[in-house]
Image (cartoon, rainbow, N blue to C red):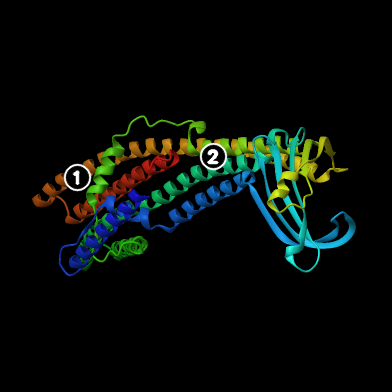
Amino acid sequence: MFKRMILFFVVAIFFTCFYLNAQDATNSTTNAILPYEFYVEVMRNSIPDLKINAAQVTNAENTLMSAKSIGDVDLTAQIGAVGGVESFGGVDGINANGVQAGLGLGSAIPYTGTRWNVALTHNSFFSGASANNISVFNPSVVVEVSQPLLRNFFGMLDRYPIKDAEYALSIANYQRRLNDISVMTTYQKLYYEWILYKKVVEYMVIIIEDAKTFQEQTRRRLVNGLVDNDTYQNAKRQTFLYEDSYNQYINTLEDIKENINYFIPLGNIEPDYNAWSSFLEVATNVRNIQRLPFSESVYGQIAHNEKIRAEYVLSAMKNNNLPNLELVGQVGISGTNDQGYFNSFGSLDNVDYFAGLKFSYPIGNRETKAQLENARNSLYAITAEYDRANKDYNVRMGSILNRFRSYEFLYTSKLEQIKAIESRMATQLIKVNQGRLELDDYIETRIELVQAQTEHLNLQYLIISTIFDYREILSIE
């Protein structure tokens, strides 16, 4: 807890300094850079979803603590007025009033099923209106113990809520890990989407400039009667299409920034482009990424715990369906004394006891039978859910691996295409300078190059995104 407080204050100080620098950057021509590591740390400490996930684990911990309360010792105490017919001074049948005080302790031992109870009761009777006339004291101590032999044998049903809560807590911890990583993956991808769309917008500016140049060249050729009107209109329409795409990319970029801005005021802050190249270098150097078996994944651990939890519930409900047969014992000691309050405890010479068996069973027993059938159905459904989770995991894992291999191939192929276009442009530029090629052809090739670079950029993001998906399914932070 202390370490987390220190981390919180460090992040808070870092964020304050960063924000002040960003404010200065807003008033200058140089934009501040938001480091990826700092961005992730701020998100981890700010996103509400992570706090909700933590609260769910806390609830599971509290449920377990509540379940363990079956082993708590119950303390009871009472005091009050009591009346009856007593013997005073050898005279029987005298109405007397008095004070009764009682103290009791009782508990269950969850892992044996044993229940015990100790009760101490003391009656002080007196005749007349004054407390000084107290003359009879009746102390008693009763000890009761019971041990189930069939239903709840060795505390099977007493342990049930504890074991169930332990399974629930284990599942909650696994689920929190999955949920936290899923949420963080979304925001980690968001940072790279921010870079992606900023770069795409920059490429679109180049394409639009070239498209407008091409459109103007086509207009001049139309005026000179070198092309028909439909050729010019096609060039004009293409420019509008590029501008539409540009505006769509701008809108998406603003949406991304709006999402980030809720947690980190951006102003003129820019993402760190080095984070893109660094992650891409790692991603493109990944080879032979492995398919982790379902049973070893966090998804498999959740499904496994759900299954053994349902199996345990079924075994508990089977035990709950048995008759209630208990070995019971009770010992009571009591006495009567008129020699004073404290001296009365020396008169505990009357002993009563009982030892035997106690049996009970509801005729019909429909409630426990229904609970048993529900437990069977639940285990059946959870077993099917385990198989479905196994299938979904393996399909998703296979899809991630296939996408990664496909994007690797497309990445290399697109890179070769870009090199080919750049080589073609170099040749065309020579021809243009020699007057053997129209400038329009060169501009069209230049637009083609930027489009290929945009597609290549998108492939880079897909590789980065796929690596994040792979880390998410493996629950790697």
Mark 1 secondary-structure assignment: helix
Q: Where is residue 61 in the image (x, y as percent from the top left)?
A: 53, 48
Residue hosting label 1:
422
Q: Position of residue 84 (x, y in %)?
A: 85, 60
Mark 2 secondary-structure assignment: helix
Extreme residue in the front direction: 89
> Is residue 343 visible to us here?
yes
Name the mark nearer the viewer: 1 or 2.
Answer: 2
**Front residue of 9 and 377:** 9
Q: Is residue 334 left or right of residue 263?
A: right
Q: Which amino acid does label 1 sit on?
A: Glu
The answer to whether 63 is drawn above or below residue 128 in the figure is: above
Q: Is residue 263 left or right of residue 448?
A: right
Q: Is residue 136 left or right of residue 476?
A: right
Other residues around mark 1 within 10 Å, as few (<14) / some (14–19) / many (≥20): some
The structure residue drawn at horizontal position 89% and vertical position 56%, both measured from the top left corner, is: 91
Extreme residue in the right direction: 93
The answer to whether 107 is drawn above or below residue 136 in the figure is: above
The structure residue drawn at horizontal position 84% and vertical position 56%, both measured from the top left corner, is: 89
- Badge 1 or badge 2: first in the primary sequence: 2
> Is residue 200 visible to us here?
no
Q: Where is residue 13 in the image (x, y as percent from the top left)?
A: 25, 59
Residue hosting label 2:
302
Q: Which amino acid does label 2 sit on?
A: Ile
Q: Which mark is residue 87?
A: none
Number of numbered discs overlaid on the protein picture:
2
